[in-house]
Amino acid sequence: MGNVAIINSANARRALLPILVLLIGQLTLSGSSAQVLDKQKLLAGETFWDNRDWDWYQENIPFFECPDADIQTTYYYRWELLTKHLTYGSPTSGYTFTEFIDRPFWSGTYGAISCPAGHQLYEARWLRRPRIPRDFARYWFRTPGAEPRRYSCWLADAVWALHEAHPDRSFMVDLLPDLVKNYEGWEQRHFDANVGLFWQTGHDDGMEININSRQTQDTVRGAPGYRPTLNSYLWADALAIARVADLAGDMQTAARYREKAAALKRNVQKKLWDQGRQFFFHMNKNDEERDGHKVAAHRLTYETGQYAGSPHGLELIGYVPWQFNLLDAGYESAWKFLMDRDYFFADFGPTTVGRRDPMFSISNRCCVWSGQSWPYATTQTLKAMANLLQNYKQGVVAREDYYRLLSIYAKTHRKDGRPYLAEAAHPDTGSWEGHDAYNHSEHYFHSGYVDLIITGLVGLRPRGDDTVEVHPLAPADWDYFALDGVVYHGRELMIFWDKEGKRYGRGAGLHVIVDGRKIASAEKLQPLTANLPGGTDKRSRRPLVSGPKNSESVPRCNFAVNNDGAYYPRIIASHTAEKTSAMKLIDGAYWYHLHPPNRWTNAGSTSGSDWLVLDFGIPRRIHEVVVYPLDDGELSAVRAPWRVTVQRWDGKGWLPIQNVEQQPRQPTARRANRIRFKPIETTQLRVVLRRAPAGQLNVADGSTASFGLTELETWGESAWPLPMPAEPTSLATNRAGKDFPKAEASFTSRFDRVAMANDGKTNFNAAPHNRWTSFESRHETDWLAIDFGAPKRVGRVELAIYDDGGGVQAPADYKLEYFDGKDWRPVNNPRRLPERPIGGQYNELRFEPVNTAKIRVIFTHQGKSRSGLSEILAWPE
């Protein structure tokens, strides 16, 4: 009881702390309220939440309200979507983002893909703490397998955009050599000096099947061309590098990259603009032929080929140069097509190609960019449109058009009436059918939205100097809007419009407030500029709730995560339900819905409690454990655990950790549950989860609910560089590529390699690729064998069973045999954990030790699926 009293007292103090901090902050900032928006009320006003971690949102995002309910709901949905893709890759690299909610085989390390990286960084820069976007920026240049040039993107520009929101000269100067190296990589592979432009294929530009690729032999990939996209991206990158070089005092590099940018600009305007059609176009690099029709090199879309002379060929990518303010004045006539239903405008658009185009086509299958509404391109177009309205003099489009298109985009974020996003939508119906197949692009992070609200609708225009510039594009007839809690240049920034002065009680008009002090106002919605006051708001320097303080100092690390295929850290569960995996708990990502799954549960366990053991392989100093409980809905079979306790291993047994603070006190689903304590040093932790008492948390059939988690984190601090545990070498492992031990199989899929089954790396995700499978085998059973090259004593085998939920799944059964010199024989007294094979985790088989030169595992396949392994380990005991 004494321990309970301590916990209650600690939680009571902790409950009072936010109230005291809030009161002090209010007095410090203004003598009244320091904010105009009720954060919790805004969160509670939305009904779509999967992630209900109100603390995280209040700590990490700026809050927004406006009279348009769809725009407002989509704003908060996009922040939740960001959390679904947030991935803690490793303690040494920190945070990244995925594009697909899961990790497809073509993604880079930790599931990141470079194609949307610019959009993702522009979004994440508005997090109140810059740790996450800075980690993600650094990831692209310093993490093996990150693939920054796998697809077109604007990385240097996006890193500079982050600097404009959260200035950090040392961070930027440190990245300068990486930014230059990346640009040089583009030049070496994609720059045509004779033309003065970069070339790219449609596929690697993110546009697989488009009106230009369909005129070549390779419809999906297309042929090389000089496109408005990549050339605009690299113009922006060159200019960003010049600005970073200015910060570094490297005038030579700055001048060189400004020259590169100037040359690109001249050639984009001169060579990709068609004066007759008043638009920017793709230009072919080489002569191409399809179906007897030839398109000529160095000619624009429809200047040659089957549709030569057509006045069409307009693609939404023609607006990309304005996304970066690349263009001089004189090209604004191109915008007359955007709001025209004969061209790009649609009720759930814009379309990727003009509707009257002879190749216009709406498809119900993935990756056809000949008419679909594509959020990636819609984001670019809205960004370009905001720049046009805020930085150019023209009379073609107005801010009412921006709002109309933004409103359409917000409403397109729906499926069955709930916020949702996939890869592409039907421009006339808003349907995602054919573009959001299971485990493909659900809640897809391939676009932007938050940045469009902050920099476009509200109009905060980030700058490198200490100036606040606001140019709102909100409708003039709106009575109000507010953006509250933006951290900008280390200050707390608030922008609000109150037409009559009645909603917020701070006076009528447009107001800009910094650290509680009004620095600019206007009676109308109009541009405002003001200098930031001196000093910094120390509160804005607070570390992330669940992240390291920063990468440069002693980092706060999640020691549980294992995405690199290493032996440690390892996780073991007392019970694992079918179709779930304990390894999902240490993949650095969390989300709560059923499909695609990212979970471990104890469904089917008959015990009142189950446990998870984390073996770090080395002493780690830990002060916080975080669990993310599941809840599949009222009366569902999977709920949050009733109790969670943490124990440490002292070398002899498990001891309870004393004097813990739990927040929230009762385990609560769909949010981070934090268990804090004084730092301890241990090689292993055990998390014990208890089931609800009988009669409570019942499911539909009257039984007591099981429990589950989507992630488990262990946070602590360490010396830097981070010490890593030694990798034990199993008898089966061949890291050096020697003749033995050698993996062999009865059948190996053409997509896989049998040598990956014993290369010392384990990865249960599709990417990076590391597996053997028998996919496409015609047999009901297949085997995988290890030839040690000489007799070895073997008594335990671990199988890292791969399961993609489709053509490769955990086997229905397996057995182990050893070679006695003449024949294969079954091992004696086999004991399996778990008893039934489970994919996505290690399956252990113990048996009476044998001396043998070969072992083999015989898999009985599960129905029409086939079996596979990421790794096989063999041990003498």
Image (cartoon, grey):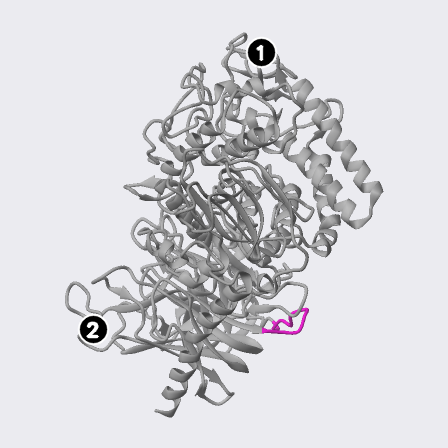
Q: Which residues are magenta?
A: 717-726
Q: Is residue 746 visible?
A: no
Give the camera-side residue of 63 and 162.
63
Per the rendering, the mark at residue 303 is 1
**Relative to 1, is 822 on the left or the right?**
right
Give the camera-side residue of 179 and 73.
73
Taking the spot 32% from the left edge, 70% from the top edge, the residue there is: 835
Image position, residue 39 (x, y; %):
41, 57
**Relative to 376, is 503 on the left or the right?**
left
What kind of residue is marked 2? Answer: Gln
Taking the spot 48% from the left edge, 48% from the top edge, the residue there is: 483
Question: Which residue lies most toward the right here?
Answer: 252
Q: Judge whether 158 appears above or below 626 on screen.
A: above
Residue 718 shown in magenta: yes
Give the camera-side residue of 207 and 229.
229
Q: Is residue 364 visible?
A: yes
Q: Judge whether 569 appears above or below 516 on screen.
A: below
